[in-house]
Image (cartoon, rainbow, N blue to C red):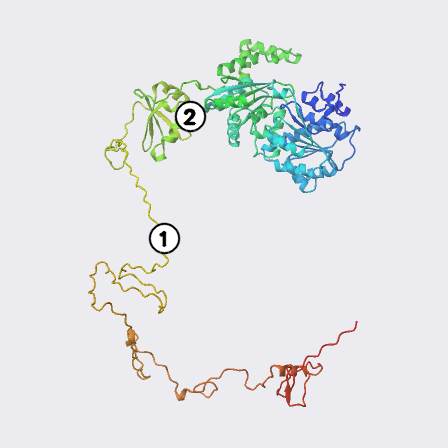
């Protein structure tokens, strides 16, 4: 039994049973005596054993002096992981590590049945492992009690912040007790992680191993130059050359994952996919197929870049170049774990080489640049692998000896060896012919004259909205040529013709391929010479002739003189206090005069200066006696037309003005007057209620009448003997009653 110093004996026994002889550098660093019960911020390489490291670091905090756990109604430790796969992997690691201590480990991850997780928590769990979103749901539903929590671990904390789990992490740590031990583990420690540690840790100690500052020695990095259209073919050749037990191909989008999965399945590879659109059950089945050997290649997005641990993963391929050094390190760290060797291949198009070089420099990684494996190299590797097949050197058993002798009697050894070679090659995909990317070709500063260019035609034209702005990039991308190698482009109604330099015409055809397809619906045709394109004066593709195009003449630039007007300062005239408000200038005759109010005797009268005539009119002759005063017109009373009698009722309704007679009022006739009151000739009286109703008293008399009702005490005193009334003010008046003060009610006895 190996004695691990600083490790709880129960956990040390589990490590020995697992086959551990020595601890990794990060595992030895976290169990140092000076770091006991301290908050830690640990950064180490991927695959360096961080899960076992925080497992043995939590041993003294959770167990203390005891060797086994007692029953716990609430958890004492919490581990938060960014992805479901990493959370389930951490659960498996902690189960065998704390199996001797009798610990119960529960998981709370998205995609699983929440009711089963709630039952597991109700039965009692010592350690809970989960993802941020699901843990927050359990805390909000009061199914996860964190009142007795002693330690919290954030695994891959930087990835959780990048995925947008900051609010969930703050909610979880805010619900935990303030007195606890907090451990943060990550491959990199950016500024966001340092700020989070300052907020939720108490005097944390930064732990950095020496290997974390150096390049991962167990991973071999290779950068391969390819043409942009040969990316998938290059990946196929890399898989055929290395022939790994398990390989992981990283793409940037889900669409790229689906396209590449269908392509590799058709080529005979056993492929599974990992992306965010899959359910947890589908993802678990995919990972299990890789572990069991039923699948060889896994095509995934960055969702699988964190914490995915496949024991036989030998190759990682970057189909799309990562955007930052952290993603590159986490992707590549899926291989070369626990002392095993691995290869990381970067498929680099020639237009992304400079960006890839800067990315490797920032990540402090030295990669070997080269070309993807060719067909000859793959065939040579297959032969060498076949000759080293261990089945060729294994001894022949007695059961096989009789059948081997029968085969040798019927067939010669050469035929048997050829059949064995064919059987070995039948289950593998054929390698692909790759295009020379020619990344070192010098750039041309100007377009050369195409005196002997080669003409091609494509099956899109003006009717298909063909434009040079998308035709030229398509030709350069598919044909692996530059824009300087393409001459004139002539777009017609149904097709487009273009000229390619004679030196790159063969390369252009080789890049397009034998199917002569630029895209799905764009086909290519080689022409014998320049196409016969209709001129502007003789249009062959229909339309009206517009005549020859006039040459463009650029007019010389003429500089026009510019004269700046001098600034003229206008004098400022201060108005005098005794200045007459009314202007003395002659007023135009057509100007409107607004009334300013009723003139008074002491107001200055308007000047009687002659008015200026209106434009186009001759001035009126001036009077010798001066302007005449304005006279008011006399009032003339208009005479109304004679009234039209009842007999002469026919009047002209179309007449207008004073000539139109008015309609006479109809006078009531004596025969039409009824005997009803208020009708006919009698004057209608105002209605005052029912005529036969008695007159009801009002005012004080009404109050007295109401007060004299039987069974009710009078509210007012009434003097019936006197005929003279007396008011409150002492004056007397005729009325037969006197209104006195109201009696005060007696106070009730308590």
Quarter assignment of residue 160: top right
Question: Residue 170: x and y, percent?
Answer: 64, 37
Question: Residue 371: x and y, percent?
Answer: 49, 17
Question: Few, some or many C-alpha atoms within 10 Å of disc 1 (few <14, some 14-19, many ≥20)?
Answer: few
Question: Residue 495: x and y, percent?
Answer: 33, 30
Quarter assignment of residue 630: bottom left
Residue 680 appearing in the image: yes
Pair 2/1: label in front: 1
Secondary structure category for the residue under label 1: loop
Question: Few, some or many C-alpha atoms within 10 Å of disc 2 (few <14, some 14-19, many ≥20)?
Answer: some
Gap between marks 2 and 1, in whole Å?
Answer: 80 Å
Q: Which mark is residue 477?
A: 2
Q: Earlier in the sequence, mark 2 or mark 1?
A: 2
Instruction: Tally the marks.
Output: 2
Which corner quadrant holds the C terminus? bottom right
Which corner quadrant holds the N terminus? top right
Question: Residue 544: x and y, percent?
Answer: 25, 37
Quarter assignment of residue 727: bottom right
Q: Which mark is residue 574?
A: 1
Residue 430 appearing in the image: no
Q: Residue at x 20, y 65 (%)?
A: 622
Q: In this picture, is 112 found above or below 266?
A: below
Q: In this picture, is 116 found above or below 386?
A: below
């Amino acid at each position: 039994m190996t004695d691990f110093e600083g490790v709880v004996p129960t956990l040390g026994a589990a490590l020995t049973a697992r086959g551990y002889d020595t601890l990794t550098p990060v595992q030895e660093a976290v169990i140092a005596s000076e770091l006991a019960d301290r908050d830690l911020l640990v950064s180490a390489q991927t695959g360096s054993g961080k899960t076992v490291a925080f497992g043995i670091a939590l041993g003294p905090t959770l167990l203390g002096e005891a060797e086994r756990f007692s029953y716990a109604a609430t958890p004492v430790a919490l581990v938060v992981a960014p992805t479901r796969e990493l959370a389930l992997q951490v659960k498996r690691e902690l189960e065998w590590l704390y199996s001797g201590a009798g610990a119960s480990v529960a998981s709370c991850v998205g995609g699983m049945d929440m009711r089963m997780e709630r039952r597991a928590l109700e039965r009692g769990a010592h350690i809970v492992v989960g993802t941020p979103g699901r843990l927050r749901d359990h805390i909000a539903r009061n199914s996860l009690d964190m009142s007795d929590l002693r330690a919290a671990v954030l695994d891959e904390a930087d990835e959780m912040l990048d995925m947008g789990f900051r609010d969930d992490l703050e909610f979880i740590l805010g619900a935990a007790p303030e007195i606890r031990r907090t451990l943060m583990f990550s491959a990199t420690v950016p500024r966001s992680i340092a700020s989070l540690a300052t907020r939720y840790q108490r005097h944390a100690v930064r732990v950095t191993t020496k290997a974390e500052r150096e390049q991962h020695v167990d991973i071999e990095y290779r950068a391969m130059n390819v043409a942009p259209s040969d990316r998938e073919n290059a990946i196929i050749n890399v898989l055929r050359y290395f022939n790994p037990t398990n390989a992981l191909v990283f793409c940037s989008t889900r669409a790229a994952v689906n396209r590449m999965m269908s392509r590799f399945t058709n080529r005979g590879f056993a492929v599974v996919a990992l992306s965010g659109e899959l359910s947890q059950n589908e993802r678990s089945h995919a990972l299990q197929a890789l572990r069991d050997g039923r699948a060889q290649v896994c095509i995934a997005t960055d969702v699988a870049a964190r914490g995915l641990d496949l024991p036989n993963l030998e190759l990682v391929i970057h189909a799309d170049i990562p955007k930052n050094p952290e993603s590159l390190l986490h992707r590549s760290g899926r291989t070369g774990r626990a002392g095993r060797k691995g290869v990381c291949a970067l498929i680099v198009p020639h237009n992304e080489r400079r960006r890839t070089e800067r990315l490797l420099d920032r990540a402090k990684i030295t990669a070997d640049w080269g070309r993807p494996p060719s067909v000859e190299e793959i065939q040579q590797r297959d032969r060498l692998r076949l000759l080293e097949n261990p089945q060729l050197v294994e001894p022949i058993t007695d059961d096989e000896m009789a059948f081997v002798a029968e085969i040798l009697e019927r067939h010669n050894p050469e035929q048997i060896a050829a059949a064995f070679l064919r059987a070995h090659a039948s289950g593998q995909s054929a390698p692909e012919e790759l295009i020379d990317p020619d990344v070192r070709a010098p750039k041309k500063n100007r377009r050369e004259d195409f005196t002997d260019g080669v003409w091609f035609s494509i099956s899109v034209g003006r009717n298909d909205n063909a434009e040079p702005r998308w035709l030229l990039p398509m030709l350069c991308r598919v044909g692996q040529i530059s824009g300087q190698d393409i001459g004139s482009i002539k777009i017609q109604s149904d097709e487009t013709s273009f000229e390619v330099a004679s030196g790159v015409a063969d390369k252009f055809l080789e890049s397009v391929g034998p199917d002569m397809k630029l895209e799905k619906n764009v086909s290519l045709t080689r022409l014998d010479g320049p196409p016969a394109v209709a001129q502007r004066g003789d249009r062959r593709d229909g339309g009206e002739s517009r005549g020859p195009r006039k040459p463009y003449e650029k007019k010389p630039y003429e500089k026009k003189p510019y004269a700046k007007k001098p600034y003229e300062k206008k004098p400022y005239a201060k108005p005098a206090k005794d200045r007459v408000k009314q202007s003395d200038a002659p007023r135009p005759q057509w100007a409107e005069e607004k009334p300013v109010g009723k003139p008074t005797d002491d107001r200055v009268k308007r000047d009687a200066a002659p008015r200026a005539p209106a434009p186009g009119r001759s001035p009126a002759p001036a009077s010798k006696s001066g302007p005449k005063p304005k006279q008011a017109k006399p009032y003339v009373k208009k005479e109304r037309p004679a009234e039209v009698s009842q007999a002469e009722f026919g009047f002209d309704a179309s007449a207008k003005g004073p000539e139109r007679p008015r309609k006479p009022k109809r006078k009531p006739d004596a025969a039409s007057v009824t005997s009803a009151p208020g009708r006919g000739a009698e004057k209608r009286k105002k209605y005052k209620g029912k005529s036969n109703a008695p007159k009801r008293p009002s005012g004080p008399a009404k109050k007295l009448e109401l007060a004299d009702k039987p069974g009710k005490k009078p509210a007012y005193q009434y003097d019936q003997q006197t005929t003279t009334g007396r008011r409150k003010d002492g004056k007397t008046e005729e009325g037969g009653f006197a209104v006195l003060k109201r009696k005060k009610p007696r106070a009730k006895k308590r």
